[in-house]
Image (cartoon, rainbow, N blue to C red):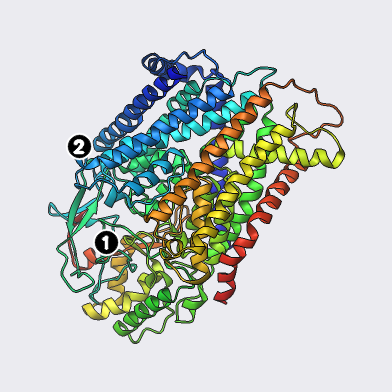
Amino acid sequence: MNATAFAECAIYVLLLLALAWPLGAYMARVYNGQALWAQRVIGPLERFVYRICGVDSAAQMDWRGYAYAVLAFNLFGLLAVYALQRVQASLPLNPAALANVAPEVAWNTAVSFASNTNWQAYGGETTLSHLTQMLALTTQNFVSAGTGMAVLVALLRGLTGRLTTNLGSFWVDLTRSTLYILLPLSVLLALLLVSQGVVQTFSASTSVPWLDRVLTADGKPVVEQVLALGPAASQIAIKQLGTNGGGFFNVNSAHPFENTSVLSNLLQALAILLLPAALCITYGRLVGSPRQGIALLLAMFALFLPVLALTVWSEHQANPLLTALGVDPSMGNWEGKETRFGLTASALWATATTAASNGSVNAMHDSFMPLGSLGPMWLMQLGEIVFGGVGSGIYGILMYAFVAVFVAGLMVGRTPEYLGKKIEAFEMKMAALVILLPSAAVLLGTALACSIPAGTQPLGNPGAHGFSEILYAFSSGANNNGSALGGLTVNGLFYTVAIGVCMLVGRYWVIVPVLALAGSLANKRAVPPSAGTLPTHTPLFILLLVGTIVIVGALTFIPALVLGPIVEHLSLR
Amino acid sequence: MRQQLGIAMRILAVFTLLTGLLYPMVVTGLAQLVFPAQANGSVLRANGTAVGSALIGQPFTAEKYLWGRPSATTPFADNAAASTGSNLGPSNPALVDAVRARIARLRQADPQNGAAIPTDLVTTSASGLDPDITLAAANYQVARVARTRGLTDADIAAAIAPCTREPLLGIIGTARVNVLCVNLALDHVPVQP
């Protein structure tokens, strides 16, 4: 990694911390009901929502009630996204006269957006009408992120509650997350992006003449350049802030209308990690010990920075097969990258978007060097806990924290505790479920796809790289990331169904055990800390946590990673 | 429980209207009011007629023009109605073949040029619509464009300079040249800013 690349990454990390800190403090005040200034402005809207929806904002839910509300709300969201796609041809705001979406693609997209994955089995500008993009996708971008944040807040009430069954109200947590946090930030970011040239209009396209003569592949002249347009900026703002990642255009944030400049790229890259990082600060404040949140943030950086360094270094390497043809060996790997971002910002984005469960791309990961795609793939496989999704990243890494204190407890022969709550058999079962189910979905899905023609025929690249495409797809789906090695054609029946199932597993079979665990923790009394208690904010604990994550992640996935990126890397020499 | 189902449906309807309809409409309204040129595709105009977008690349094949990044869009290059990348992996023989053909085309157009081939000039962009090339890729083509047009290298460099953007703060990004901007200048098209 050269000095400029290092400086570029350092600027990014410092800006991220500078923004995450105050935002995290603000969010803690929102969930505590202490954001007085914001309540004066947004409070009337919040109360209006409760009134017309019949929500009693003081009513409390136990974990079953909370889980029921989450699942019911997400199911209706999923059905709405499916239905809108299936009838979009007969609805307004369809200026490009796009047809109804095929059932399997519509199902996949519905699951994808409800589960905060935003895997794209569809090509944005060629498949979905503006109405579908807005009513279905933009709405889910908000509420799926809000769902993750709400579940996190419920878990925190479990950690801080004493002998209670109350986890708060999902409706209140969802509404506050959306109205106080996601919506204002999105309006601000969307307008900043428009100022940089990101398009925002209800027309479908505009046309401009060519300067040179342009012919199709079979020699016919093309009259003019049709520029696809649409209400992109509003969707992109929440796609980045809500760790969603589903693009307005097919190539996502690589499209010059979706991500126009160095500055728009920096803003979007910051938005990818902003809320997941800020929520660490929020977490510390809500459990009454800011150091706890900082410990989680440091553990995340300890995993993020080495992968970032590997990815940036890899993409600055030249492809030896092209060097042999006379291509400049000093320029790095430019296939599938945009000139305005450059190599460092493309590698930085790839690392950030897979560390968070965002999944938007500004470069084609399929054309990354083998070791450049290894890091992003591994970050997803860890379960989207290095920053992770908004809310889901922290409840994910907390599962590892429970495993870490449990392992430490086994070593010294004490009942493990976390924040004064005893971690017992039930908590360990739930944490193990959360960690193992998505991993199983990744490996079993990959194995199935490798062994049937429906899984291997859609491959875009031969050899070890083809295997990487499959492994990446299931890693992305089962961990709700949404990015892809795009050479794999995923709109066929097998992949739409299989990835759809993985996305459901990765989201809801995680949320339900997390809420069950929250319910169990809430019901315990707090144990006062003693000399034998393992403090969970010290460098020792951070090391233990990172070690647990690396060992679990490494043992589960290194064999599969060897077959893909590592074999390809060795074969390139 | 049934009451919760009712709330779930109503709250979804409210958020659909609020975040799915009202939010994009408000942002569109503000964008069209405050940043009309940017919000509608940054279209460049000369004497009132559109001549291209400042943000979207166009393909150039004539030797008198600066060439841009190769594009993977179909059925023609830089199809801005259907963006796509090549998605070819680094070990894919199809990538090697495609790059070999592009190098042959560059060498055929400029046989005297013995410099190493700038990587971005023979590899496809992520979107297929990249408007820029690196400064190295622009400099590589100066002699060819000058010779074809009967101009000096300095004339071409003078056209490239105003279309060049340096990295932000000298650190973030790559020095890059907007290809359409250079070619419009070379053809003396009076583009209004």
At 59% from the left and 21% from the top, the residue drawn is: A167
* Mark 2 element type: loop
* Mark 1 element type: helix
Q: In this view, does A86 lie to the left or right of A407?
A: left
Q: Where is residue A94 in the image (x, y as percent from the top left)?
A: 21, 42
Q: Name the residue under label 2.
A: A92
Spatial CA span between label 2 and label 1: 38 Å
Q: What residue type is labelled 1?
A: Cys
Q: In which quarter of the image is residue A48?
A: top left
Q: Which amino acid does label 2 sit on?
A: Pro
Circle 1 packing at 10 Å, graded few (<14), some (14-19), many (20+), is many
Q: Name the residue under label 1.
A: B181
At 53% from the left and 46% from the top, the residue drawn is: A479
Q: Is there any visible trace of residue B193 in the rendered image?
A: no
Does mark 1 fall on the same chain as mark 2?
A: no
- Please name whichever residue, A311 or B147, is drawn nearer the observer in this view of the structure: A311
Of circles 2 and 1, the one toward us is 2
Q: Which mark is residue A89?
A: none
The quadrant of the rendering that contains the N terminus of chain A is: bottom right
Name the chain under label 2: A
The quadrant of the rendering that contains the C terminus of chain A is: bottom right
Q: Where is residue A243 in the image (x, y as percent from the top left)?
A: 48, 41
Q: In this view, does A293 lie to the left or right of A474?
A: right
Q: Where is residue B130 in the image (x, y as percent from the top left)?
A: 34, 61
Name the chain under label 1: B
- Please name whichever residue, A469 or A440, is drawn nearer the observer in this view of the structure: A440
